[in-house]
Image: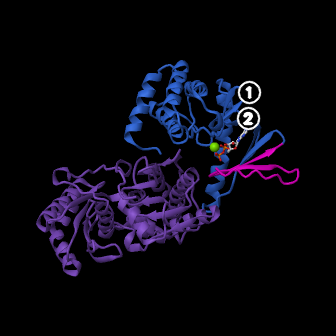
Chain colours: A purple, B blue
Amino acid sequence: MKISILGLEGTAWNLSAAIVDENDVIAETTATYIPASGGIHPREAAQHHANHIADIVRQTLKKGGRNISAVAFSIGPGLGPCLRTVATAARALALSLEVPLIGVNHCIAHIEVGRWKTPAKDPVTLYVSGANSQVLAYRKGRYRVFGETLDIGIGNALDKFARSVGLSHPGGPKVEELARQAKQYVPLPYTVKGMDFSFSGLTTAAQEALKRAALPDVCHSFQETAFAMLTEVTERAVAHTGKNEVLLAGGVGANLRLREMLAIMCEDRGIKFYVPEKRFMGDNGAMIAYLGLLMYKSGYSTPVPDSRVNPGFRPDDAVVTWQ
Amino acid sequence: MAIVNMAIGGSPTIFASGAEAMITLDGNTIIKTRVQKRYRLKEIDETLRISRTKAEARLISEARRCGVPTPIIKDVTEFEIKMEYINGTSLKNVINPSLAGQTGELIGRLHTCGIVHGDLTTSNILFKDGKLYLIDFGLAYLDKTVEARGVDIHVLFQTFESTHENHDELIEAFKDGYSRMFGNACEILERVKEIESRGRYA
Ligand SMILES: Nc1ncnc2c1ncn2[C@@H]1O[C@H](COP(=O)(O)OP(=O)(O)O)[C@@H](O)[C@H]1O
Ligand SMILES: [Mg+2]
């Protein structure tokens, strides 16, 4: 019988349910939380997820819900209240459908969906989202973190900067657009320490720079600096591991300038660069369902008593049972 | 690290090329050149290459002053360091418990000096005439925190583990050597254990 997995994602902004089988996504429904003002309010986001989850799951099951083999959900990392809301729904669903429950690591789901939907086999992954910014690669049973942010994720850095200059949410795309109108570069701090990097000093310095420079110029300089840092650490990981593929994952991966930098770096090193379709880059239920499917096939399941969410779940704490 | 040992009729030999630098050999001089990165803005690229070249040369000399054998710096220009060629072999090829102990002393001395290497591998330590030399200060920085020193050692232990059979013996010998040279070695080695249990820094 064909395996099909229902996956629930709700670690932050996006609430999404999807059903996948080994070949493709059968159904997917998403509802996005939009804050009334400012950045994400974890409790408000959780309330949004609680209000919509029944509907989202119902619609998804209606589109493709025959013979669900297991229910997968993001067990972490993410915002505690959001994770708990979605986990509660996942437990209830698994019990009522009488199928196993599978708690999956959200970061690893981003990587696995990329390996599914692009030709990448064993890549160095640059994972860039609101809260997360990491360079990862597989070695001996785990996805190892080769480099990561020492403070905030690149997405949150962009959003924070955008909000401070009065741009509405989500700020990243607006910064990207403004950057195209830039006339000159303004020096900003470039912070790479070993294989790690930091964005909070850059964000503060960009706000300061507005006193002497035009907004498009600062947007441009912010992007050029931050993305060069990310590309550099990715290149270091490639040199260190000897791998010959780079995969881009996470919502910030939609940025065209970041893609261009990574593409040039890979071209100059003579290695392959892969970017999944946009729908698989930001947080989505399909990636959770797909990693659930891989784990299900390897015989893994999460007993309900062990299904407590883990807001700080590191990808390198998860043992890879499916490769 | 791709070792491309190709001599082009008398001109400098390309020795190696890593993530950011190209190494050539000219007579008994090693030339480490930070190459241009097309992906980043010219202004950023040049500023970085200049400041890193300067910092690396400075820390190589600084380490030497503290009694850590490093190549003698012969000349530094914007993107290039010319230094003494250590005509030996990588520690990788010759490591044994006795040399691991010597490595412990070397790093103990470096840390005492306030320098963290940032990229400790058995390829970045050279062996010549019974003596160890530390090279590649491209990621080095000044830092006296327990965490920075702990990560430094942890990274080296990981190369022991991934590339050498008798790694437990090597690690023990390293610890002995480090403790001989570094005042509060216990605290650092405890932290190494903790960092290991956190499971990061591949
Ligand atoms: N002074 C030197 N003497 C002998 N060999 C050297 C010297 N400097 C570098 N090398 C060789 O070149 C390789 C790469 O140099 P390194 O400084 O480590 O650059 P990278 O940052 O690219 O790793 C080293 O692993 C070593 O084999
Ligand atoms: Mg080196």
Residue located beneath label 2 in the image = B88
Element on which disc 2 rests: loop
Q: Chain of mark 1?
A: B
Residue A81 on image: x %, y %: 20, 55
- Please identify the quarter of the rendering in which residue B195 is found: top left
Q: Residues within 10 Å of mark 1 (few under 14, many from 20)?
A: few
Region of the chain picked out in magenta, as a range: B1-26
Residue located beneath label 1 in the image = B129
Q: Residue at x 68, y 57 (%)?
A: B36
Residue B14 on image: x %, y %: 76, 51
Give above or below for A57 relative to B69. below
The quadrant of the rendering that contains the N terminus of chain A is bottom left
**Residue type (three-letter) at the residue carrying disc 2:** Gly
Q: Which label was assigned to residue A264?
A: none
Residue A184 on image: x %, y %: 59, 64
Res. A31 visible in picture: no
Element on which disc 1 rests: loop
Give above or below for B7 relative to B54. below
Q: Separation of disc 2 and disc 1 at Cα?
A: 8 Å
Q: Residue at x 72, y 33 (%)?
A: B71
**Residue type (three-letter) at the residue carrying disc 1:** Asp
Res. A219 visible in picture: yes
Which badge, 2 or 1, comes first in the chain's sequence?
A: 2
Ligand 1 lies under 8 Å from the Cβ of mark 2: yes
> Among all residues in the image, which is located at the extreme front?
A1
Decide which of B34, A240 is in the foreground and name it: A240
- Please identify the quarter of the rendering in which residue A18 is found: bottom left
Label 2 in the same subunit as label 1 = yes
Q: Are marks 2 and 1 in contact (CB under 8 Å)?
A: yes
Ligand 1 lies under 8 Å from the Cβ of mark 1: no
Residue B42 on image: x %, y %: 65, 60
Decide which of B52, B103 is in the foreground and name it: B103
